[in-house]
Image: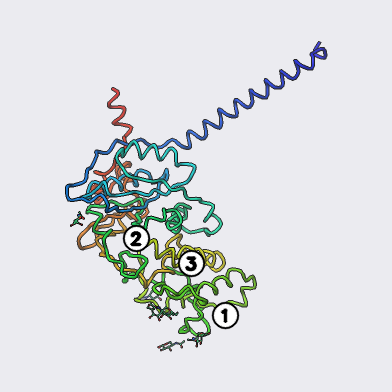
């Protein structure tokens, strides 16, 4: 009997069978995408209004990354900034995020901060995926960590200055004081830490390709950030030739990586890239993004450092940084979740707390193993806790 089935019936059957499969597939797809995109929920922050003394022309532009992992930290950071601002309505936030998460993150920001002046900028992680070398601390090598390299491309041309903040910071001062620092002719301002042993941020490889004459700045890969016309033959061209020349072993004796630090304005020192004030116009003019990318390409071939996104910044800027007061980056808070160590504050006044250590305060608070300083983070936490939600339902 089966063989008597008409052609039409047969087609209907297969089509139905096919659409059934397709239906299942869509359900599966929806299921996986919605679970991947389920973000925590946050309480609505109170509205903060400008004081009478505020001029609505004085915008302060702040950039931060937004992703699922650090969302709770970013939201606490934003909350702390507007809460301590005399003119909170003048702050404009520029959130750097991936295309995939932008819709759901926009919703989260809008419902948490209905009054916030913000923009979302899509960072194409493909830009860096093939430039990132495998690193010891994987968490430092998340592509969004590198978005700060592309700020000048992501921000509208009308933005001339930007403050970049990591997602594990709390600001306890009026951010306008940081915004108004005088950069003089510098591209970048940040607190510097000259007691840190700078040698250790790079591998012996980096320091040993140091032949010919270490005093000859003609050999260096990048010479002078402070000099507006320095995009001349020496710096960029020599990097281009390195990046394009396959016969690199012959070039080794010719390379002087460490020579990059010759002729810097001041002693090259470590600085933390989690808090930076950037002159975006100068950055564009000096093609800083290209220089950072070049160092990432060199890293892939030569392993000149072990960390992720920080060393390229040191290579381009150390010794050319406008020093900002240390109060604006009390970094290294947090410490170590595994061994339960807690770092203390550095001496001196505090305008910004930075949990740049491995352990994040929200994870320690959740696991009831908070460090004393985590108590300073907690008041800015806007997460709707599951327990509170279920309490309310009872
Ligand atoms: C607003 O502008 C006036 C006049 O330019 C200036 O005196 C005042 O300090 C400004 N207020 C703030 C908060 O910057
Ligand atoms: C910095 O570290 C390097 C390598 O670990 C070491 O050789 C050097 O003596 C250190 N310098 C200072 C000033 O401690
Ligand atoms: C570099 O210059 C310094 C002082 O100008 C000198 O002491 C040193 O020997 C020079 N190094 C080389 C490798 O020529
Ligand atoms: C650098 O190169 C220029 C031109 O190629 C040359 O005149 C100059 O002497 C070189 N500088 C040093 C320190 O060797
Ligand atoms: C770098 O800039 C400083 C200050 O602008 C200048 O004195 C120095 O000659 C420059 N060095 C090079 C190699 O252009
Ligand atoms: C920048 O460097 C060029 C040559 O490298 C030099 O002629 C010029 O004077 C420098 N400018 C400043 C401001 O240092």
On the image, the x and y values in percent for residue 68 come to: 42, 43
SS assignment at label 3? helix
Residues at circles 2 and 1 in contact by the CB criterion of under 8 Å = no
Q: Is residue 118 above or below residue 231?
A: above
Q: Position of residue 222 (x, y in %)?
A: 47, 73
* Residue name at image x 41 percent, y 37 percent: 39
Q: Position of residue 40 (x, y in %)?
A: 38, 37
| Picture quadrant of residue 111 | top left
Q: Which residue is mark 2?
A: 276
* The C terminus lies in quadrant: top left
Above or below, 142 relative to 180: above
Disc 2 residue crowd, few under 14, some 14–19, many 20+, Cα 10 Å: many
Image-based side of 171 in relation to 166, left or right: left
Mark before the other along the chain sequence, 3 or 1: 1
**Which colour scheme appears in the figure?**
rainbow
* Marks 2, 1: nearer the viewer: 2
Residue picked out by circle 1: 253
Q: Earlier in the sequence, mark 2 or mark 3?
A: 2
Q: Whole-percent x and y of residue 72? A: 35, 43
Mark-to-mark CA distance, 2 and 3: 18 Å
Distance from disc 3 to disc 1, alpha carbons, whole Å, reads 22 Å
Q: Report which residue position mark 3 lands on.
A: 291
Q: Earlier in the sequence, mark 2 or mark 1?
A: 1
Residue placed at 70% from the left, 22% from the top?
Answer: 15
Residue at 79 percent across and 14 percent down: it is 6
């Amino acid at each position: 009997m089966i063989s008597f089935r008409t052609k039409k019936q047969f087609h209907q059957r297969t089509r139905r069978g096919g659409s059934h499969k397709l239906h299942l597939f869509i359900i599966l797809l929806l299921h996986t995408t919605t679970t991947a995109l389920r973000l925590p929920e946050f309480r609505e922050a109170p509205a903060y209004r400008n004081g009478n003394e505020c001029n609505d022309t004085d915008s302060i532009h702040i950039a931060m990354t937004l992703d699922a992992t650090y969302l709770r930290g970013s939201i606490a950071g934003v909350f702390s900034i507007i809460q301590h601002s005399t003119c909170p309505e003048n702050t404009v936030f520029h959130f750097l995020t991936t295309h995939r998460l932008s819709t759901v993150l926009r919703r989260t920001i809008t419902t948490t901060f209905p009054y916030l002046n913000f923009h979302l900028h899509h960072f194409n992680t493909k830009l860096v995926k093939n430039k990132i070398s495998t690193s010891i601390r994987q968490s430092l090598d998340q592509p969004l960590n590198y978005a700060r390299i592309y700020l000048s491309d992501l921000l509208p041309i009308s933005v001339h200055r930007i403050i970049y903040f990591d997602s594990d910071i709390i600001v306890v001062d009026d951010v306008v004081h940081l915004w108004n620092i005088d950069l003089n002719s510098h591209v970048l301002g940040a607190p510097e830490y000259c007691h840190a042993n700078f040698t250790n941020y790079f591998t012996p490889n980096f320091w040993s390709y140091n032949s010919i004459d270490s005093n000859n700045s003609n050999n260096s890969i990048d010479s002078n950030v402070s000099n507006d016309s320095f995009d001349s033959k020496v710096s960029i061209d020599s990097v281009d030739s390195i990046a394009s020349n396959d016969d690199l072993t012959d070039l080794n004796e010719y390379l002087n990586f460490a020579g990059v630090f010759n002729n810097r304005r001041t002693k090259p020192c470590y600085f933390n890239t989690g808090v930076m004030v950037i002159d975006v116009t100068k950055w564009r003019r000096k093609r800083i993004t290209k220089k950072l990318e070049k160092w990432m390409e060199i890293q892939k071939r030569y392993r000149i450092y072990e960390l992720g996104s920080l060393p390229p910044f040191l290579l381009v800027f150390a010794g050319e940084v406008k020093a900002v007061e240390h109060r604006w980056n009390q970094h290294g808070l947090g410490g170590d979740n595994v061994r339960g160590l807690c770092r203390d504050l550095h001496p001196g006044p505090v305008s910004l707390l930075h949990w740049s250590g491995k352990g994040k305060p929200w994870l320690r608070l959740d696991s009831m193993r908070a460090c004393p300083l985590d108590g300073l983070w907690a008041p800015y936490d806007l997460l709707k806790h599951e327990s509170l939600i279920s309490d309310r339902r009872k």
